[in-house]
Amino acid sequence: MIDVSQSPHVKLHSVPIRAVRLDEGFWSARMRINVERSIPTMLEELEQHGIVDNFRRLSGGKQAPRRGPLYSDSDIYKWMEAVAYVLESEDRPDLRATFDRLTDEILAAQEPSGYLNTYYVDERTDKRFAEMYRSHELYCLGHLLQAAIAYYRSTGNRKLLDGGIRFVNYMVENFGPSKRPALTGHPEFEMALVELYRTTGDRKYLDFAGYLLSGLERERLHLTDGQVQYMFSGIPFTLRRHFEGHAVRAMYASSGATDYYAETGDAAYWSTLERLWSDLSNHKMYITGGVGSREAGESIGEAYELPNAQAYGESCAAIGNMIWNWRMLAVTGEARFADVIERALYNGINSGMSLSGTLYCYRNPLESAGEKIRNEWYDTTCCPPNLERTLAALPGYFYSTNAAGVYVNLYDNSHLDWHLENGAGLKIEQKTKYPWSDTVELTLTPAASSEFSVFLRTPGWSRSTEFTVNGKPASGVAKAGHPGGGSANAGRYFEIRRQWRAGDRVVVKFDMAAQLVRANPLVREDAGRVAVQRGPVVYCIESPDQPALSSLFDIELVSPAEAFREEFRRDLLGGVTVLRHRGVVAEKPLADEPLYQAVAKAARSPVKPVELTLIPYYAWANRGLTSMEVWIPLYQDGR
Amino acid sequence: MIDVSQSPHVKLHSVPIRAVRLDEGFWSARMRINVERSIPTMLEELEQHGIVDNFRRLSGGKQAPRRGPLYSDSDIYKWMEAVAYVLESEDRPDLRATFDRLTDEILAAQEPSGYLNTYYVDERTDKRFAEMYRSHELYCLGHLLQAAIAYYRSTGNRKLLDGGIRFVNYMVENFGPSKRPALTGHPEFEMALVELYRTTGDRKYLDFAGYLLSGLERERLHLTDGQVQYMFSGIPFTLRRHFEGHAVRAMYASSGATDYYAETGDAAYWSTLERLWSDLSNHKMYITGGVGSREAGESIGEAYELPNAQAYGESCAAIGNMIWNWRMLAVTGEARFADVIERALYNGINSGMSLSGTLYCYRNPLESAGEKIRNEWYDTTCCPPNLERTLAALPGYFYSTNAAGVYVNLYDNSHLDWHLENGAGLKIEQKTKYPWSDTVELTLTPAASSEFSVFLRTPGWSRSTEFTVNGKPASGVAKAGHPGGGSANAGRYFEIRRQWRAGDRVVVKFDMAAQLVRANPLVREDAGRVAVQRGPVVYCIESPDQPALSSLFDIELVSPAEAFREEFRRDLLGGVTVLRHRGVVAEKPLADEPLYQAVAKAARSPVKPVELTLIPYYAWANRGLTSMEVWIPLYQDGR
């Protein structure tokens, strides 16, 4: 997704998608659905809703009014980026032909100047670049470039890339401090510009990203306080002290700023990024990795403002969190960023697509009384193709390299076929049923025996982790990283440095027992409640599994004296491990009690025991309209 | 405020403002500030911001552009209504002259047709009644009528009233089922129409209110689902099943519907009103009597969605809650409605005006990290004059009558000089320091000795209440009402029926000990927390009273083995009873703890004892920018 092989200020380098094959396992099932169902049906939706016709009408290929919101061009670009990633994993001439056809149809709408946008045409032509706080012109261009670069990397075909460059060159020539003022009203273009610099080596693209991040044009563009808060642009990025405003904009802006830092090493950027990351992970991130508390403005709330039923948690924002942390991981090599990637991926992103692959969440609340949360289409359909490109790119997140060796970031049944940075070939096979099983077997096949390090991510949630090499305990060197867990290695990479030979076998065994998680008491909505997490998977209770109960919200989880009982249910929700535990339920429905009552009178209502079944959060809302809760009240006798 | 003396479907009748004098006490201090500071400075603000000039420019009296939002005419009308109520209590020739001058300036802008609105003029003339979902034309007319009727009642002068009637007649003649379609995009006009019917006896005004409440015009006006939810109008009122949408609109619509029921006795209205009242008081009302959880759309949230820091709780919505319950009380004679009036009045309304009388809250959150909540002016300045008219009308809420006798709804140092419904004169003197003291002495002076009932409201919060007549325990007859408290009479009117003689002395003694209140566990934000209430007054902790603590939000209240210590502080915040109690504070700031951690690891952080001081919620934010909290975490050892 990003090529940081030449970036001077990164510690880890990416491994291309094509070097990793996900075998039968947790993610391969999702990826297969993505390719077989999601991607084809989404193109049908985009066609039906006129999003491709918006281009055809400009080249005379179709007589039709323009349809969709002003940013709809980006939806087809994101879809194309997904296809480009699929082509790294599979040879799909049909998808390649579709991409090429779409490229032709899109570029046929490009003007000689390079300008390309289906909204600012006809009677809106004179508004081009005149309302950049809302126009999404550069946002669409950014997505075009990302699709074009991905396709160029996977196929060598640079037709769309050349088209994108024509538009970018038009921008660079006409906009800047001594020219017309430019602004990313929805940040995203910054990432694409840095990637274009990485792809072409032409520094002017990096400089233009720096210009946009510098936020110099507030005055010339008459931006209000509310606008620069909402857009997360328009003032110098390095003046940001906390997250606010539109969640997706904030994540994308931070991703672009990290890309910019990776190339420039500007210390002001790094201190800002560290501060923002701390603000997000300490104050504003859902346990699912979701971001964005408020529906109003699709925005990030105040510190600790993390409502559950009202959570917005847009799928795109969780994806933004993941792609930002991917860049932070590259820059630092610290496992805390990979922990966030895993958290977002398995939960707040994974919830965004139905098990069928054809329904999508825009919002991802952590509690629901039965609203319709999955739809096949949204007028603002940013999330569906964003989920598709994320799943298609997934193999690219599994490994990284540096001069010392290879980093294992994620675990799943898979094969790596790549090389060390000295060029020596290296294959790694992972055999595991992760995240359902706690054990991963890695078999290494270096092309020739040599000394290097294998860095195994030890997730922050694993309270104790055992590493063996060829059956003997491995002594590791704990790497920098925050001490997120109870064991010395949790939240770090465990380094095993040795002379590796073909067939060497590493076994990692995590502590995957389901655990209760509590939130900081300053999170008002989670007080007295716990979440249940098993490995990377956050669980929830959902009404279909509690058929005897009239209201899911009368349930409390009995404070555990005993462990959760685990059962893998192949038949359920695509195959999940369910958790069972003792609970209680109020004998009189809570809804029948008054809103307020004096404590003296409020003797605890009688409860009766109940057997609770928990399912993975990501799998909720696949059985009709249901009620669901992640943060469950904790029942303690004598409370 | 409302004259229900001829209304066939009420159980209680109002006592005019002029019949009640509030002597030195809790409310007289607020009312004096209102007359001496709030009302004069608000007129200055209205003048400075061009709200009166908007009328003058139409009659050629002033060359100026129109200023303010499209509903700003209503702000001056509400101010005038406040003045009209003041004139019931005091002879103020200056205010009367100002009212008359404003009347002339307003009516000079009225068109021959009767149309009167300063926004839909000039280039917007053709939009009259063409965008009623937002236009506020009828909202402004409603407020004009309420001011005009109040002034007519207090002075006999009907000049403004006649002007208002001209506009209403224009509406009635031109709008209706077989004429042009009408809609109250912001309900309020319905109340005014019923009051105009009560004032003139002309049934066409009542019928027009019924037409508006019938919501017949959804189709002709092409109203969307979102619009009819938000406006709380546009569909038949009797189809409403729960509260939603804009909080003030919902309260005003319900008030108008209750007025309509009081005249018609339409059973469908009553069952709707009962259902809505239950929805509000069981699911959607703050402990302060505030209404409206969400800033987005200034709206009522889902059931149990009652956030504290993010609470909207617009002052106007709490006032709407009070005036609606005043009508419900008249219709039923049931004390549960008076309980809500008292709750809103002492807390969520009273917080809306600063102790200085010149700063106003628009939002009334129940928790704050130090935002600026009080301002002298808002572009949408609905709340300030609304607070002023409410305080000026306050004496009118103290008593009601029916054929059996007299109802005492509220308690404060005061004199009533009125008569029973048989015409026999009756004076009642209340001597009390309520709400700081628990005792009220009432001395009755009937013009001639006779048998009748005195109904004394026993608030729902009083766990035990003693009544004596001339020093001897009074035997009462409990009246209908919900059993809100622990004593048999709490939440009811206590009836004392006897032969009353001049000088008879009733003493009521409430249980006013501070008590802890908990919210239904379904209110996510209040879980594990308690509010402290003493009598009708809801308390809070505010940072100036806890000077040694770095964060107010690290405090917990120790579960009370001992009572709160009370101290009346004459010097503090205009004179308040403060409460003191043991608390604890985390030794390590909660903000330094992680956002999420495994419960096993989250052994309770060490705490140290701290002495907590609580002040009345209404008095917060009068000492600069402070942090504040109503719902305080409850500390229980061993938790």
Image (cartoon, coloured by chain):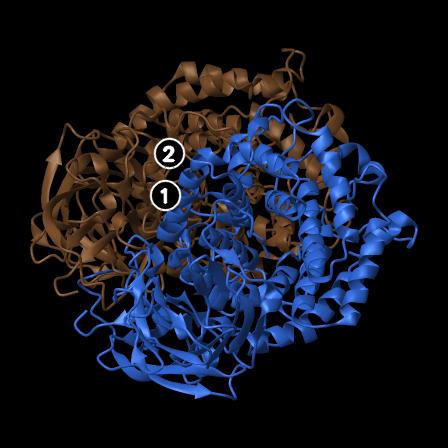
Chain colours: A blue, B brown
* Residue A618 locus on image (x, y percent): 49, 71
| Residue B327 in the figure: left or right of residue A160 | left
Please give the count of numbered marks on the rendered protein: 2
SS for dot 1: loop
Residue labelled with disc 2: B373
At label 2, counting other C-alpha atoms closer than 10 Å, the crowd grade (few under 14, some 14-19, many 20 or more) is many
Residue A569 sits above or below residue A405 on the image: below
* Residue A170 locus on image (x, y percent): 75, 35
* Residue A353 locus on image (x, y percent): 58, 69
Q: Is residue B30 visible?
A: yes
Determine the chain carrying the residue at label 2.
B
Q: Which mark is residue A60?
A: none
| Residue B517 in the figure: left or right of residue A218 | left
Question: What kind of residue is marked 1?
Answer: Pro
Q: Which mark is residue B365?
A: 1
At label 1, counting other C-alpha atoms closer than 10 Å, the crowd grade (few under 14, some 14-19, many 20 or more) is many
* Residue A99 locus on image (x, y percent): 78, 62
Q: Is residue B249 visible?
A: no
Q: Quadrant of residue A565?
A: bottom left
> Which residue is nearer to you in this view: A433 or B383?
A433
